Amino acid sequence: MIKRWLPSPPLSLALFAVWLLLNQSLDPATLLLAALLAIAVPLLTQSLRPAQAKIRKPMLVLRLFGLVAYDLVVSALTVARLLLIRRSRDLAPRFVRVPLAMRDPNALAALAMILCLTPGTAWGEIALDRSTLLIHVFHEDDEAAFIDMIKTRYERALMEIFES
């Protein structure tokens, strides 16, 4: 019964809390509207979410999280350095096509978040059959090394977490 009305309790709780924080009020009308949103939004968007994620290696998630945090800092410093010391004409922005072996929608969503958070990269598009990912890179001299980095650092770990 609860699962029917709250298909995603963490999402409902987050929506409830965010609504209260945005309104900075605990009056009954705000609480009621927060509760209605916490119930209605997950129900209305249930069909938009990918299949329920089954995380197979939780310790690998922590390792990947640490690796991504490290990569975010390194990438931010690299982009800042490039902006400060390189002339615009010396930069090599490009779109890179990365062939993908993973197909799990949750793993693809995680990869999208990683790439969109990383300074200097942006998710471009994914092929309809999910076989190729197009990424815009702020500066890249070695396309093959970039593709290898995506596949070995992120794709392999995400496949172990979501698909194995």
Image (cartoon, rainbow, N blue to C red):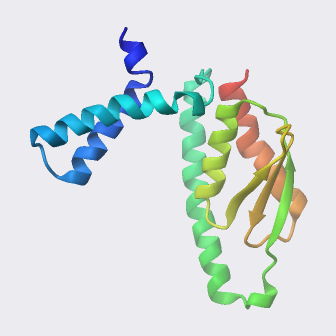
Query: Where's the N terminus, which quadrant?
Result: top left
Residue 13 seen = no
- Residue plotted at (38% across, 21% down): 6
Residue 125 seen = yes
Left or right of 54, for residue 121: right
Of all residues shown, which one is farthest toward the top? 1
Query: Where's the C terminus, which quadrant?
Result: top right
The quarter holding residue 144 reads bottom right
> Which sits in the foreground, 159 or 44?
44
The quarter holding residue 157 reads top right
- Residue plotted at (84% across, 60% down): 96
Instruction: From the top left corner, tell me how far across and down residue 7 is, in percent.
Output: 44, 21
> Which sits in the foreground, 55 or 112?
112
- Residue plotted at (63% across, 80% down): 81
Left or right of 53, for residue 8: left
- Residue plotted at (71% across, 43% down): 154
Instruction: From the top left corner, tell me how far across and down residue 47 is, in percent.
Output: 58, 28
In this rendering, the count of numbered labels is: 0
